[in-house]
Amino acid sequence: MSLTLYQLDGCPYCEKVADRLDELGIEYDSVWVEALHSKRDEVKRVSGQRGVPVLVDDDRGVTMAESDRILELIETTYAPEAQSA
């Protein structure tokens, strides 16, 4: 599985997503972004916007923003796989 989470240090929405991935034992790479929106060029390149968190799943071709949507994706897609592993 090839997951990348773009996140900002101290962002509670990013922490929610990272905590759930950690609870499920799902491996992912973290990319820490700049605090200034204008400096988040890499996030804009991968997702078309500068907000975080952003989850990128290269294996499934999914790029998603908004913590609640990401958490829903984790629960429906990755949690069953993590629990059966």
Image: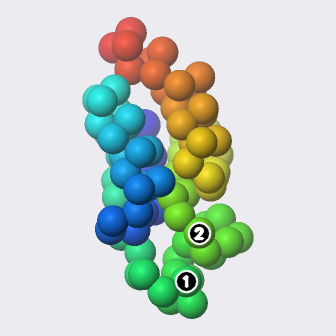
The earlier-in-sequence mark between 2 and 1 is 1
Q: Is residue 18 left or right of residue 44?
A: left
Quadrant, the C terminus: top left
Place of residue 18 in the rendered image (x, y in percent of width and height, measured from the top left): 37, 46
Residue depicted at x 54% and y 37%: 71
Q: What element carries label 1?
A: helix
Q: In this view, does 80 lie above or below 34?
A: above
Q: Is residue 65 left or right of residue 19?
A: right
Q: What element carries label 2?
A: loop
**Eyeballing the image, is 75 above or below 55?**
above
Image quadrant occupied by the N terminus: top left
Classify residue 73 as left or right of residue 7: right
Q: Which residue occupies the extreme right position in the image? A: 48
Q: To which residue does mark 1 refer?
A: 37
Q: Is residue 38 above or below residue 26?
A: below
Near-viewer residue (43 or 12): 12
Mark 1 residue type: His
Can residue 23 be seen from the camera position used here?
A: yes
Neighbourhood count class around disc 1 (C-alpha, 10 Å): few under 14, some 14–19, many 20 upward: some
Could you tell me residue 48's position as x and y percent? 70, 70
Which amino acid is tagged 2? Gly
Kindly indicate whether the residue at mark 1 contacts the one at mark 2 (C-beta within 8 angstroms): yes
- Single out the residue that lies furthest toward the top: 84
- Determine the image quadrant of residue 33: bottom left
Across and down, in percent, residue 60 comes to 61, 39
Please report the residue visible at 40 percent of the width from the left and 63 percent of the height from the top.
11
Q: Examine the rendering and report whether any part of residue 45 can be seen.
A: no
Say which mark, if any, is on residue 51. 2
